[in-house]
Image (cartoon, rainbow, N blue to C red):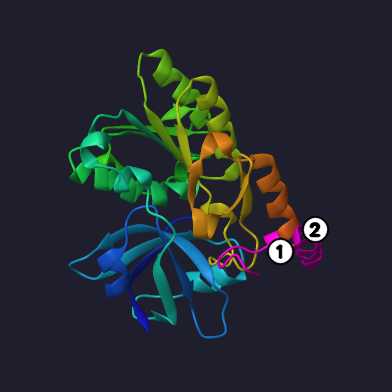
């Protein structure tokens, strides 16, 4: 059992939990995720790691209520426990695994949308701890839906807050702030965008025009977390990949976002899942590659 040491609603329908999980905390890296289950009969929920403390043996997760499983999770309190807390899973961020001296030479821009701020934070924090400053854009629909602003402010080189309704920070979409920063003379060697699929699609459309290599995290399309469900099957260039076992980070300019978003919609129904399984045959599943 994995005890919850802290549980709080940090904004409407978005929750933060600190979980005692020494083995995960010992080996996890920014960009990776865990799979949690509240009890032995509950669904598997993949969640990107928001933070970790190796000395304390804790891992921080942030999640939004999107279904029955996360609704039940939101009712857990400090002192309760998860039945399963499996990880770290997936591949760590390339910025983290690359040679640190090489990373120091890059001008890096992070773009976080909504709950995507949670997986952006550990990457920016790791860079900050290694003497690397990165510009960070955090976007939300309204001021009330912003998360981790103070935490991000402490580790970002420059932090730009945007709200769709102009209620706080800069007004407009995150793409507008990207355009503004480039117009002001900022040059970026790489952009990392994490958030809703539609946001990442339009960030990539813009950064391709601006000739800025861009990495996206496809954690929003993961369901099972092992490749066996087939939910996160995605086309990257001319290759079929699975976000949970091959990612979750990919070259954003190669992601077929329209296909991935259509797949998300289909996968919500039993009929849609059956259609995808029949259409894709042996390539429907990832993981072992032999199913």
Please tell me whether residue 283 belongs to the stretch shown in magenta: yes
Query: Which of 179 and 70 lies nearest the eye of the viewer?
Result: 179
Compared to residue 35, the image places residue 196 above or below, namely above
Does residue 261 appear left or right of residue 186 in this picture?
Answer: right
Q: Which residue is mark 2?
A: 279
Q: Secondary structure at mark 2?
A: helix
Q: Which residue is mark 1?
A: 282
Give the residue at x 45% y 30%: 213
Does residue 152 appear left or right of residue 72 in this picture?
Answer: left
Query: Which of 91 and 43 lies nearest the eye of the viewer?
Result: 91
Range shown magenta? 269-291
User: Which numbered marker is on residue 210?
Assistant: none
Residue 93 location (% of width, % of height): 37, 48
Query: Which of 183 and 279 lies nearest the eye of the viewer?
Result: 279
Compared to residue 66, the image places residue 252 above or below, namely above
Give the residue at x 46% y 39%: 215
Give the residue at x 20% y 69%: 56
Q: Secondary structure at mark 1?
A: helix
- Tell me where residue 82 sits by quadrant: bottom left
Callout 1 environment at 10 Å: few (<14), some (14 to 19), or many (20+)?
Answer: few
Callout 2 environment at 10 Å: few (<14), some (14 to 19), or many (20+)?
Answer: few
């Amino acid at each position: 059992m994995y005890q919850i040491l802290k549980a709080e609603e940090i904004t409407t329908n978005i929750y933060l939990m600190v979980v005692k999980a020494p083995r995960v905390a010992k080996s996890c890296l920014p960009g990776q995720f865990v799979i949690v289950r509240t009890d032995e009969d509950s669904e598997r929920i993949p969640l990107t790691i928001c933070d970790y403390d190796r000395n304390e043996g804790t891992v921080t997760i942030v999640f939004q209520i999107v279904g029955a499983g996360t609704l039940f999770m939101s009712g857990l309190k400090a002192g309760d426990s998860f039945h399963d807390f499996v990880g770290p899973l997936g591949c760590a961020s390339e910025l983290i695994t690359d040679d640190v001296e090489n990373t120091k030479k890059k001008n890096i821009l992070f773009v976080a949308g909504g709950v995507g701020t949670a997986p952006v934070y550990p990457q920016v924090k790791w860079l900050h701890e290694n003497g690397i400053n990165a510009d960070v854009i955090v976007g939300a629909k309204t001021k009330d839906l912003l998360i981790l602003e103070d935490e991000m402010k402490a580790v970002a080189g420059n932090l730009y807050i945007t709200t769709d309704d102009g209620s706080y920070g800069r007004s407009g979409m995150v793409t507008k702030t990207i355009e503004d920063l480039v117009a002001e003379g900022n040059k970026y060697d790489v952009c990392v965008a994490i958030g809703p699929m539609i946001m990442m699609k339009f960030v990539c459309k813009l950064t391709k025009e601006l000739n800025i290599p861009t990495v996206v995290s496809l954690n929003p399309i993961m369901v099972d977390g092992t490749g066996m469900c087939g939910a996160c099957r995605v086309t990257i260039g001319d290759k079929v990949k699975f976000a949970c076992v091959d990612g979750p980070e990919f070259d954003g300019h190669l992601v077929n976002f329209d296909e991935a978003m259509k797949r998300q919609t289909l996968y919500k129904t039993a009929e849609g899942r059956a259609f995808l399984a029949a259409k894709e045959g042996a390539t429907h599943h990832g993981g072992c590659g032999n199913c």
